[in-house]
Image (tube, rainbow, N blue to C red):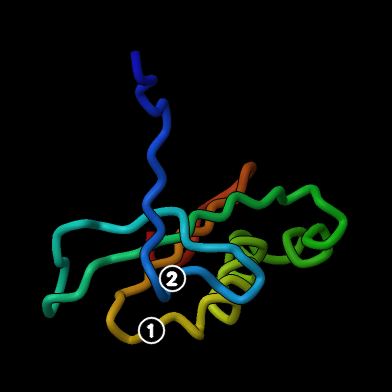
Amino acid sequence: MLGVPSKIIIIIVGLVRIDGKRPDGLTLIPWQGGKPLTWDVTVVSTLADSYFHSTSHAAGSAAETASIRKESKYSSLPPEYLFQLVAIETLGPSMHWL
């Protein structure tokens, strides 16, 4: 009897970055303008040393900083995809548009 694979992974060409990382998700149905939507979710802690100074002055600053970093990481995605970033703080608000 042949075994059934327990996990199937589909990797879309062009979505994997040079370092091997890829966005968290991709719609199979075109989203806008005939392009599929891809997204990446980031959750940051407002108490982390790297964000503590900025979050003590402005709510949402950790999520905004994380979103800027992620946008630059995924800036090389092909234009055939729409990219949406979601950044949320563990003890505070989400990005300004959520």
Which of the pair 27/88 is nearer the observer? 27
Image height check: is 79 above or below 48? below
Instruction: For mark 1, give the secondary structure.
Output: loop
Image height check: is 80 above or below 89? below
User: Which residue is painted at 46% across and 54% down in the image?
Assistant: 24
Quarter of the image where one finds residue 65: bottom right
Type of amino acid under label 1: Pro
- CA–CA distance in space, label 2 to label 1: 8 Å
Which of the pair 74/93 is nearer the observer? 74
Sort mark 2 into few (<14), some (14-19) or many (20+) by Cα contacts within 10 Å.
Answer: some
| In the image: residue 70, left or right of residue 36 | right
Counting from the top left corner in percent of width and height, residue 62 is at 67, 62
Farthest front residue in view: 1
User: Which residue is painted at 59% across and 63% down in the image?
Assistant: 21
Q: Are marks 2 and 1 in contact (CB under 8 Å)?
A: yes
User: Which residue is painted at 87% across and 56% down in the image?
Assistant: 49
Counting from the top left corner in percent of width and height, residue 29 is at 14, 59
Residue pointed to by mark 1: 78
Residue pointed to by mark 2: 15
| In the image: residue 56, left or right of residue 92 | right
Which of the pair 70/50 is nearer the observer? 70
Farthest right residue in view: 49
| In the image: residue 24, left or right of residue 51 | left
Counting from the top left corner in percent of width and height, residue 10 is at 37, 52
Type of amino acid under label 2: Leu
Counting from the top left corner in percent of width and height, residue 13 is at 39, 71
Quadrant for the C terminus, please. Answer: bottom left
| In the image: residue 19, left or right of residue 22 | right
**Badge 2 or badge 1: first in the primary sequence:** 2
Which of the pair 46/57 is nearer the observer? 46
